[in-house]
Image (cartoon, rainbow, N blue to C red):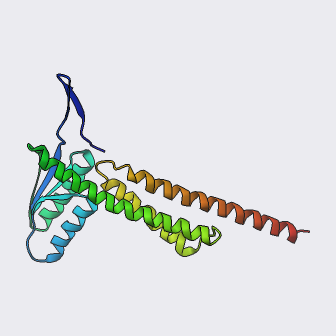
């Protein structure tokens, strides 16, 4: 993750400005599915809008690759796009944008944490046996977590709570499968007597 660096100058600690990538674009009005496609891709990347038609991501190789891909798609659609590096001159403006990125990540991670707790609660009440629905639900949570991690541009530690919840679910699954395998082995022993 790309984050602010602390630099010490003359005994004072100063935050180095974040380097940003901005994708400025315009897409033809018709067909509207093209605008929706661009919007969804930007949402998938965790980009925030600076102004209408200008999306931001912290500067790193992944962000550049994503914007470069989307730029190509926009041009294929008959639109126009440019990628520029930028930095805020007013720290207040930058803090506001960073806060929007953090809020976006926090909402997503909070939801995932609740989902993990719900699954763990169901398993605790149901004797820790996984149903097919729960297995699919956990797979979906893991997939969503993977995407959320890639959008957690400022490294919110809340992601660690979600990860702990997922590992707790995995631990319950291991215990449940060990218990099942022990029961099946005992059944086989009885059948062979």
Q: Quadrant of the N terminus?
A: top left
Q: Quadrant of the C terminus?
A: bottom right
Q: Which of the 4 image quadrants contains residue 184?
A: bottom right
Comparing 54 with 78, the one in front is: 54
Instruction: Report whether 134 appears left or right of 54.
Output: right
Q: Residue 133 at what x, y percent from top left?
A: 53, 75
Q: Residue 32 at what x, y percent from top left?
A: 14, 76
Q: Extreme top residue here?
A: 10
Residue found at x 27% / y 60%: 104
Position of residue 123 relative to residue 91, above or below, is below
Q: Residue 35 at what x, y percent from top left?
A: 15, 71
Q: Extreme right residue here?
A: 193
Q: Which of the 4 image quadrants contains residue 81?
A: bottom left
Comparing 187 with 160, the one in front is: 160
Residue found at x 76% / y 66%: 183
Comparing 27 with 130, the one in front is: 130
Q: Which of the 4 image quadrants contains residue 150?
A: bottom left
Q: Residue 162 at what x, y percent from top left?
A: 44, 57
Position of residue 48 relative to residue 125, above or below, is above
Instruction: Report whether 184 appears left or right of 8.
Output: right
Instruction: Report whether 39 appears left or right of 176.
Output: left
Comparing 55 with 28, the one in front is: 55
Q: Extreme front residue here?
A: 12
Q: Give the tally of numbered discs.
A: 0
Position of residue 155 relative to residue 43, above or below, is above
Residue found at x 10% / y 77%: 30
């Amino acid at each position: 993750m790309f984050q602010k660096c602390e630099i010490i100058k003359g005994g004072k600690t100063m935050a180095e400005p974040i380097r940003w990538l901005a994708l400025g674009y315009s897409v033809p009005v018709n067909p509207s599915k093209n605008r929706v496609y661009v919007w969804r891709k930007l949402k998938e990347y965790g980009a925030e809008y600076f102004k209408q038609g200008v999306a931001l991501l912290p500067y790193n190789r992944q962000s550049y690759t994503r914007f470069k891909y989307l730029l190509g798609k926009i041009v294929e659609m008959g639109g126009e796009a440019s990628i520029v590096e930028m930095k805020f001159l007013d720290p207040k403006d930058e803090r506001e944008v960073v806060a929007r990125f953090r809020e976006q990540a926090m909402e997503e991670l909070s939801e995932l944490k609740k989902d993990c707790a719900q699954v763990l609660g169901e398993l605790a009440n149901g004797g820790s046996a996984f149903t097919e629905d729960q297995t699919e639900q956990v797979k979906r949570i893991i997939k969503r977590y993977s995407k959320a991690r890639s959008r957690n541009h400022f490294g919110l530690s809340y992601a660690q709570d979600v990860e702990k919840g997922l590992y707790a679910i995995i631990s319950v699954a291991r215990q449940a499968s060990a218990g099942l395998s022990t029961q099946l082995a005992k059944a086989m022993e009885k059948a062979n007597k």
